[in-house]
Amino acid sequence: MQERRRARNRVLQNGGNLMSYLKDDFLLTNETAKKLYAKFASNMPIFDYHCHLSEKQILANKPFNDVFEVWLGGDHYKWRLMRNYGVSEEFITGDAPNKDKFITYCRVLGTAFGNPLYHWSQVELKEFFNCEIEINEENAELIWDWCNEFIRINNITPQKLIEQSNVTHLFTTNEIFDDLTTFEEIAKKDFKFKVIPAFRADKIMNIEADGYNGFVDKLGKVNGLDELEEKIEQRLNDFIKVGTTAADVALQGVYPIAEKSVARDIFAKRRKGEKVSEEESKAFKGYLTYFLFKLYAKYGIATELHVGAMRNNNTKMLNALGLDTGYDSIAEDNSIANTSRLFDRLEMENSLPKTIVFNLNPKMNAEIMTLIGCFQDGSARGKIQYGPAWWFLDNKVGMEKHLEDLTATGHIGAFVGMLTDSRSFLSYPRHHYFRRILCNYLGGMMERGEMTADENLVGEVIKDVCYYNSIKYLNVK
């Protein structure tokens, strides 16, 4: 407590010079936007329908040891920013003390103007630690002491962070062979939110991977493609029993649908321990994507299709750190024709599920938006969705462009809104970051006389986009 008093005194003695630039009207540049955000968006709950939080960590609910652990541990967004500034890996994922890593991040962030982390981190500091000190190298040690004292006094745990963020539901991302008992145990807790796994079969799809056969073996005895399909369907049913209503498919690009006989031969070759060519890998993925979409339609599972990421670019660092450590990028693959053929065939077979298309390449926004408009029907509001600005695009520029393209060629009233796509328990302010941008976008049009001046009507749309559309779309009670 004394350290906190000293910290506050330092702020006061410096005449507020240590205080951050954040104000109540952050990102809200017109009066209508301020009204819309305050009245309709700021207090809406959060449904995080795609994230990478650990369900085991949520269940264990152990207090965090220090601010580094909760703020920087596992967050490759922040790691990537530090690498861009030339920071040695020792101070990112290496053996440097947590305090040194934290201070290094503060030093890097202090001049990262325009990067979303420059905003997000400052908001996270305020929202979760009641700390409004500006993040930079000079203030780093002060912030370290402040936050660690806050963690100790308040016994900060994953449950507290999620509940503080007003989250009602979150969908984790779980591979087909993951243990589901954790979700059963979480359901027995008195948490004010629900944790539900989204089904993901990427490890079974990526047939070129070195550990592929080991992943398949986790499903039990699988000799041929027919047995693999049976195992996939069995596991999907296991997921459904614990509440699953969504599935993830992640591809660099959508590939042509191969005949099943071709996919069967490729799978048999790989199960013998032989390598497959790039062409064979794409053929197998094309067939299995088609199979999975049909399966998801059969069980009424909404499909989250992620396209446009070129993964694991740096082999040296992949070997050193493993997957998902900040070495992916935007791909140039233009697979819009293959996506059209996939959707068209599924539509002809009455097997096109509700689908959210997450696009990582902004050059493809209009192509994807106009394509999904060809496959809508009365079964759901916005049956085929253009997903929110994702990953490298979930910044101010990316979100504004997304809204421009969405409203120009689609219908914002059907949009399912934001997600975190994060491994950090502090990522929920990203929803409010988006909500401020959304209100600013609509408020600007209202003040320019480009749309209705009925704030209540617009407010209902904002509430739908913030929460209700995704709840209805994903069949969550």
Image: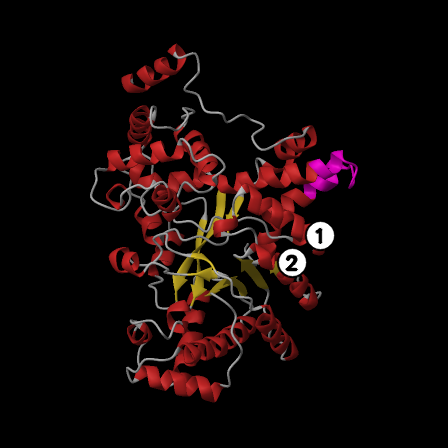
Q: Residue at x 39, y 12 (%)?
A: 14
Q: Label 1, secondary structure: give it.
A: helix
Dot 1: within a 10 Å radius of its alpha carbon, few (fewer than 14), some, or many (20 or more) residues? few
User: Residue 225: image x %, image y %?
Assistant: 40, 84
Q: Where does the C terminus fall, quadrant-wise?
A: bottom right
Is the C-beta separation of discs 2 and 1 under 8 Å? Answer: yes
Vertical position of residue 413 compared to residue 332: above or below: above
Camera-nearest residue between 404 and 175: 404
Q: Residue at x 48, y 54 (%)?
A: 50
Q: Magenta stretch: residue 226 in it?
A: no
In 3D space, how far apart are the residues under numbered discs 2 and 1 (Cα atoms)?
9 Å
Question: Which mark is drawn over residue 366?
Answer: 2
Q: Quadrant of residue 425?
A: top left
Q: Which residues are magenta?
A: 444-460
Locate residue 432 relative to residue 325 in the image: left or right.
right
Locate residue 244 relative to residue 473 in the image: left or right.
left
User: Residue 221: image x %, image y %?
Assistant: 31, 81
